[in-house]
């Protein structure tokens, strides 16, 4: 393909996002940040959930490679199997693509290939690139703390912390910063088969990173300085803490939503009092059962605060719709607004929004911090429990929904009251204002993330 004139002579980066919303967003934000600093961008994507070409900037290239993954597996909650299939099936098509790109470069058709960036979970391309003599970096889309859990996983298993058991959920994990982790913050895979599959996946991820040319992390020094330093000591590779990536570029320059945003919720927010609305969302991946959904709905309705709730298709397991019983709808009245997908960053920025009831996905957490919105945490799996620990007990910019067993409406209501109405809430809000200033500093010109990003652009990894 002939290079577009705007890209002529530019060094090119090839970015490989893992095809899940929570991973596509940070990778495309990294793409935009590198592009704005003078690099030409190719997005290499598997067929599954490929981004819409029309939403990408005109001078990006989008290369779609076959993945041969059955749609049922792509849509299932068995992420480990999906990730292994992706790595296996896409290695050869990626090799063909990269060999072709190198030939074009030799023939002078294209700018020099600077480096490849693959999601840490899409590890196979890292070794393919290395074999072909191309520098390849891994992107950790979530926190540095989570990467430390990945590194420590085998030792945590040897020491008996993992697999998680009912009896050790509250045992302190002495080995890992922030030194307030208990076992339930590490993981939630309780069955042995699931645990072994996950451990195997993490071993592949860590091996991939160790053989790469460097690690990019979607975090920033002032929030995870100790964790980043520890990673640098353990992997002895260049590490670039360049996040939060949504702050490193204009948000209007990236539209990576796989679902259609219901923008009418912004008009509804305009009709609400300033600083009054609770925004509720559990991200793009987790599923909850009907009982949890209804208890959550009752808890929200009982709290008496207006709320905007994202109930995306698939959120409630086994149910296509978000229809609530009549009695509950009556109780909610005009106070509650449900949408299937929201323009989240704009919602969090809206002056009516007072707090975010969240599953603590890393993107949602950093987006909330950058808008100074305190959080109510209901983590459900993977990195979310550890992130909730940081939010509530390390940075202290949120409160947790304290769940005894199965979620109950009273537990939801108590957490909302603690944050929205109490003295505790005032202190949390104050700390969140401070943390927002910190993130603004890190991501502005000369801040640590800005400097790290430039180091990445200039590097000859
Ligand atoms: C997944 C994991 O669940 C999460 O724990 C991990 O950190 C990243 O991968 P997801 O569950 O989707 O991600 O959560 P999150 O990381 O918060 O990402 C969701 C993204 O979707 C955010 O960027 C958010 O702004 C966006 N979003 C969410 C919308 O644009 N609209 C919505 O209505 C909801």
Image: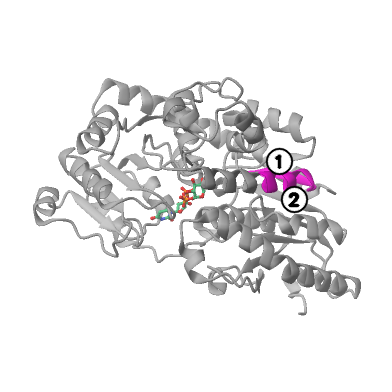
Which circle's residue, 2 or 1, is located before the other in the chain?
Answer: 2
Assess whether residue 19 is covered by the magenta stretch.
Answer: no
The part of the chain drawn in magenta is: 203-217
Q: Percent x, y for residue 202?
A: 64, 44
* Frontmost residue, 215 versus 268: 215
**In the displayed structure, would residue 422 be above or below residue 313?**
above
Residue 59 locus on image (x, y percent): 66, 70
* Quadrant housing the N terminus: bottom right
Q: Residue 284 falls in which quadrant of the image?
A: bottom left
What is the CA distance from the residue labelled 2 to the residue labelled 1?
Answer: 10 Å
Question: Residue at (18%, 56%) from the top-left corner?
Answer: 324
Q: What residue sits right under mark 2 in the picture?
A: 137
Judge whether residue 317 can be spotted in this image. yes
Magenta stretch: includes residue 213: yes
Q: Is residue 239 above or below residue 460?
A: above
Q: Are marks 2 and 1 in contact (CB under 8 Å)?
A: yes
Residue at x-position 53% and y-position 47%: 193
Where disc 1 sits, the SS reads strand
Left or right of 365, for residue 64: right
- Observer-side mark, 2 or 1, equals 2
Residue identified by numbered label 1 = 240
Instruction: Give SS at disc 2.
Output: strand
Residue furthest bottom as drawn? 1
Q: Residue 27: x percent and y percent?
A: 61, 55
Tell me the residue at 25%/33% (across/down): 411
């Amino acid at each position: 393909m002939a290079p577009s004139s705007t890209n002529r002579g530019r060094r090119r980066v090839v970015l490989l996002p893992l095809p899940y919303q929570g991973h596509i967003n940070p990778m495309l934000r990294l793409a935009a940040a590198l592009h704005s600093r003078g690099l030409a961008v190719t997005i290499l994507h598997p067929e599954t959930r490929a981004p819409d070409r029309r939403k990408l900037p005109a001078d990006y290239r989008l290369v779609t490679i076959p993945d041969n993954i059955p749609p049922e597996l792509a849509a299932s909650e068995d992420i480990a199997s999906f990730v292994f299939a992706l790595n296996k099936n896409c290695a050869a098509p990626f090799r063909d693509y990269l060999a072709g790109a190198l030939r074009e470069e030799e023939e002078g058709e294209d700018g020099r290939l600077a480096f490849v960036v693959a999601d840490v979970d899409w590890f196979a391309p890292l070794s393919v690139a290395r074999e072909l003599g191309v520098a390849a970096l891994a992107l950790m889309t979530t926190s540095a703390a989570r990467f430390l859990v990945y590194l420590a996983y085998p030792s945590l298993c040897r020491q008996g912390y993992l697999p998680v058991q009912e009896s050790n959920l509250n045992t302190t994990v002495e080995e890992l910063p922030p030194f307030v982790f208990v076992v339930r913050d590490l993981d939630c895979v309780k069955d042995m088969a699931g645990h072994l599959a996950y451990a195997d996946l993490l071993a592949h991820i860590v091996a991939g990173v160790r053989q790469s040319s460097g690690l990019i992390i979607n975090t920033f020094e002032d929030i995870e300085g100790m964790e980043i330093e520890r990673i640098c000591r353990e992997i002895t590779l260049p590490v670039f803490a360049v996040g939060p990536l949504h702050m490193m570029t204009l948000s209007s320059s990236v539209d990576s939503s796989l679902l259609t945003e219901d923008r009418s919720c912004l008009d509804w927010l305009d009709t609400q009092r300033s600083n009054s609305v609770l925004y509720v969302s559990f991200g793009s991946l987790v599923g909850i059962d009907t009982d949890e959904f209804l208890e959550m709905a009752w808890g929200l309705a009982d709290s008496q605060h207006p709320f905007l709730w994202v109930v995306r298709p698939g959120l409630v397991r086994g149910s296509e719709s978000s229809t609530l019983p009549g009695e509950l709808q009556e109780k909610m009245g005009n106070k509650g607004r449900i949408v299937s997908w929201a323009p989240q960053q704009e919602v969090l920025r809206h002056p009516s929004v007072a707090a975010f009831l969240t599953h603590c996905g890393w993107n949602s957490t950093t987006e909330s911090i950058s808008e100074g919105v305190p959080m109510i945490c209901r983590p459900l799996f993977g990195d979310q429990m550890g992130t909730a620990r940081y939010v509530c007990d390390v940075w202290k910019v949120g409160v947790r929904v304290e769940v005894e067993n199965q979620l109950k409406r009273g537990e939801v209501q108590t957490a909302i009251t603690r944050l929205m109405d109490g003295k505790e809430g005032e202190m949390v809000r104050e700390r969140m204002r401070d943390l927002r200033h910190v993130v603004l500093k890190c991501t502005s010109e000369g801040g640590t993330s800005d400097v790290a990003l430039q180091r990445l652009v200039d590097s000859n990894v």
